Image (tube, grey):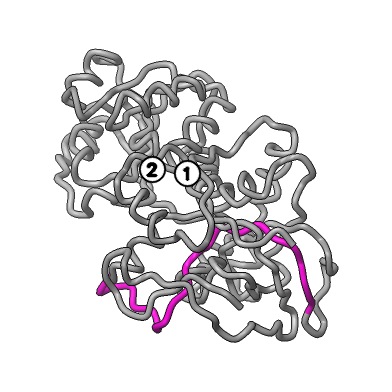
Amino acid sequence: MKAALFRQHGGPEVLEIAEVSDPVPGPGEVLVRVRAAALNHLDVWLRRGLPTMMVPLPHIGGGDVCGVAAALGAGAKGGKEGDRVVVNPGISCGRCLRCLSGDDNLCPAYHLVGEQRWGGQAELLVVPVANIAAAPDGPSDAELAALPIAYMTVWHMLVDKARLRMGETVLVLGAGAGVGVAAVQIAKLHGATVIAAASSAAKLERARALGADDTIDYAAEDLGAALKRLVGRRGVDVVVEHTGSPTFAAVVKACAKGARIVTCGATGGHEVSLDLRYVFWRQLQILGSTMAPKGRLLQLLELVAARRLVPVVDRIIPLEQVAAAHRALESRTVFGKIVLTISST
């Protein structure tokens, strides 16, 4: 099969299109013929190389996939050849206490397609049959590929972790990124007032079109001063945090009593300054979050089918231009997702 891969860590130039052996589905697995695969910042970090996240080389990235079931391994039930499917990127053992309690994203064996195993930026992908969901009619392949990682992550952050309530104020940092775009939409779906913060006026204009009530351009205005102007002493109730050190101290000071800060990443740096006086006096909660239980994807697909959520695709690029896609993502000019097209058969 044809695949986008890298044989060494480095810049986008290490990416290449190569022929590798077709994967074969084992017992309980399904072979997916990939039509579309979205990029995530994880793909960039893995390509650059992280000392705490070693992957065998060569490596094929891509955790967000829409395609067609091409073959089933022995004993695989729950799908059939020819089905259009969305891949759930979180893989767990399915047998431990966490999995059987519905918290499979806390499974000790939990890992992601495109991270600890080859991903979907290729013509073919093998995953457990439990990791495919029927694709609804209507949404495009690109929209469905843009859904799983960002929207599952944000649903878990806002709904499961923060217990977002109607009428609360949500601050969304990095509102142009995949997580940020999903957060604006999901927060509005739950009746929240949304303050979107991003690094350009163009991104904020698009965030307002998605429903953001107020916006902050933190490239042009100090984040702390802008939050003080917008919320004053009242503060914000929930913070969707995935930027890390550049913003963390300011958002802690802008929190209302009882606020929840939910973090799923640290694209701007992982070492932050924290004044504990704000945490205990305002009774703040700082919550870590990674992905979501498998069932959340089924909920999200229902909302996408009803067009109550519409995954945002910034641009669609052929697989052969994967290096250009990485450069675009690194340029931080993207709003939503970059999606690679793989096959239309």
Residue 53 lies in the magenta stretch: yes
Mark 2 crowdedness (10 Å alpha carbons): few <14, some 14-19, many ≥20 = many
Instruction: Please state the horizontal and vertical placement of residue 315, each as a whole percent of the image.
Output: 50, 43
Q: Nearer the viewer, residue 185 or 35?
A: 35
Residue 188 quadrant: top right
Instruction: Please state the horizontal and vertical placement of residue 289, each as a whole percent of the image.
Output: 43, 52
Question: What whole-number distance in Å separates the C-alpha atoms at marks 2 and 1?
Answer: 6 Å
Instruction: Please state the horizontal and vertical placement of residue 144, each as a whole percent of the image.
Output: 64, 48
Q: Nearer the viewer, residue 266 or 181?
A: 181
Residue 54 lies in the magenta stretch: yes
Q: Is residue 336 left or right of residue 202?
A: right
Main SS, magenta residues: loop
Chain part drawn in magenta:
50-72
Q: Is residue 80 left or right of residue 60?
A: right
Q: Residue at x 64, y 83 (%)?
A: 22
Q: Residue at x 60, y 74 (%)?
A: 96
Q: Is residue 329 left or right of residue 100?
A: left
Q: Is residue 332 left or right of residue 17?
A: left
Q: Amino acid at mark 1?
A: Met
Q: Which residue is mark 1?
A: 157
Q: Amino acid at mark 2?
A: Val
Q: Residue at x 29, y 46 (%)?
A: 331
Callout 2–callout 1 Cβ contact below 8 Å: yes
Residue at disc 2, secondary structure: strand
The label number, if any, that marks residue 262 in the structure image: 2
Residue at disc 1, secondary structure: helix
Mark 1 crowdedness (10 Å alpha carbons): few <14, some 14-19, many ≥20 = many
